[in-house]
Image (cartoon, rainbow, N blue to C red):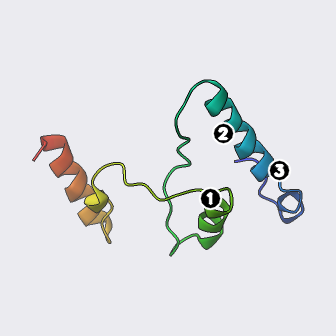
Amino acid sequence: LAASTESARKTYANYLLVWEMISLARDSGKAYFDCGGINPGASMGVFNFKKGIGGRVGINGPIWVRGSTAALTRFGRLLLSLKV
């Protein structure tokens, strides 16, 4: 989102950006800031980044929507769209 090169990562610009976004959300009366999903198996760096800024895991909807294969994911989305 903000800094993805190795030299840019060392400046911690991403931390500053996310902290500012969290501050703006708090100042506008929001109760929480959603940093999006995590997948520690596929991206441990993103998981550690979100954990490092104080992130907590929250489940916002059916956890089974993401299947272990593309076909299972599509099937889960189909079921949701049919409101089964």
How many residues crowd mark 3 within 10 Å: few (<14), some (14–19), many (20+)?
A: some
Q: Which residue is drawn at 62% across and 32% down?
A: 25
**Residue 26 against residue 67 in the figure, above or below:** above
- Mark 1 is surrounded, within 10 Å at the Cα level, by few (under 14), some (14 to 19) or many (20 or more) other residues, namely some
- Residue annotated with mark 1: 50
Q: Residue at x 32, y 72 (%)?
A: 68
Q: Residue tagged by mark 3?
A: 13
Q: Is residue 26 above or below residue 35?
A: above
Q: Which of 57 and 4 is in front in this view?
A: 57
Instruction: Tell which circle, 1 or 2, labels the residue nearer the N-terminal end.
Output: 2
Residue 17: x, y in percent?
Answer: 76, 43
Q: Element at badge 3? A: helix
The residue positioned farthest toward the top in the image shown? 28
At label 1, which amino acid type do we have?
Answer: Lys
x, y (%) of residue 43?
A: 58, 69
Q: What residue type is labelled 2?
A: Ile
Left or right side of 57 for 66: left
**How far is the residue under mark 3 from the one under mark 2?**
14 Å
Q: Which mark is residue 22?
A: 2
- Residue beneath the point at 30% across and 49% down: 61
Instruction: Tell me the amino acid under the disc marked 3.
Output: Ala
